[in-house]
Amino acid sequence: MFLLNWIDTAPRRILALISAACLAMLVFGIFLQHIVGLEPCPMCIVQRYALIGVAVFTGLAAVRSQKGWWMSWTALALVTAGFGAFTAARQSWLQWYPPEVATCGRDFYGMIESYPISRALPMIFRGSGDCSVVDWTFLGGSIANWSFLCFSALAVLMVLLLVHTLRGGR
């Protein structure tokens, strides 16, 4: 119950640590791209934006001690983490069950610039040949698998924080 005790005494520190963890994951992704040479697919880029969103929202939540302030920003971060987990789960599914016709399609920015957002989003989540490729693994899990686990863990931590606070915690 150490975690619940820490949630009760230092919720803003937990939010600051979540923000720092997201920034560390972003730095690792940039390292994999620029140093290792892995090119991110459209779904990877969406996951990066979700990480940026969670980092910004939890960072803003950690700034002020007003309960309504940090709970509102934490709720937004929770929704963003859920979106990131959904994207990572979809990419993991594509990696486990690759499409029969592997096409690389357009890159993320090409889709956004060429199509209205109502057409570009379905194209992104449909995935492409490059979204189903596993270029890097750690302990048997791909980047998408680890991304899903990280987003899920962050979401669970934020849910614990919010529920504990709503039930009469700090």
Image (spheres, helix red, strand yellow):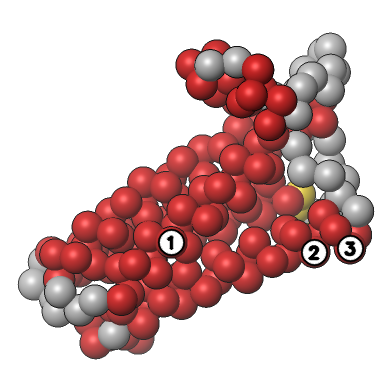
Kind of residue sitting beneath label 2? Phe
Q: Which residue is mark 1?
A: 56
**Residue with the mark numbered 3:** 35
Which secondary structure lies at badge 3? helix
Q: Which residue is mark 2?
A: 31
Q: Secondary structure at mark 1?
A: helix
Give the side of residue 131 with respect to residue 61, left or right.
right
Q: Residue 110, relative to residue 159: is it above or below? A: above
Is 33 placed left or right of 143 in the picture? right
Q: Earlier along the polypeptide chain: callout 3 or callout 1?
A: 3
Q: Is residue 55 left or right of residue 32?
A: left
Mark 3 and mark 1: Cα distance apart in space: 25 Å
**In front here: 77 or 9?**
77
Q: Can I make out residue 126 in this image? A: no
Inspect the image, locate mark 3, and give the three-letter code of the amino acid beneath it: Ile
Q: Residue placed at 45% from the left, 57% from the top?
A: 54
Q: Is residue 35 left or right of residue 61?
A: right
Q: Is residue 76 above or below residue 64?
A: above
Closer to the chain start, of discs 2 and 1, is 2
Image quadrant where one finds the C terminus: bottom left
Residue at the image point whose x is 37% and y is 55% from the top: 77
Residue 150: x %, y % from top left: 56, 59
Kindly check if marks 3 and 2 are in contact, taking CB atoms under 8 A apart as contact: yes
What is the three-letter code of the residue carrying label 1?
Answer: Val
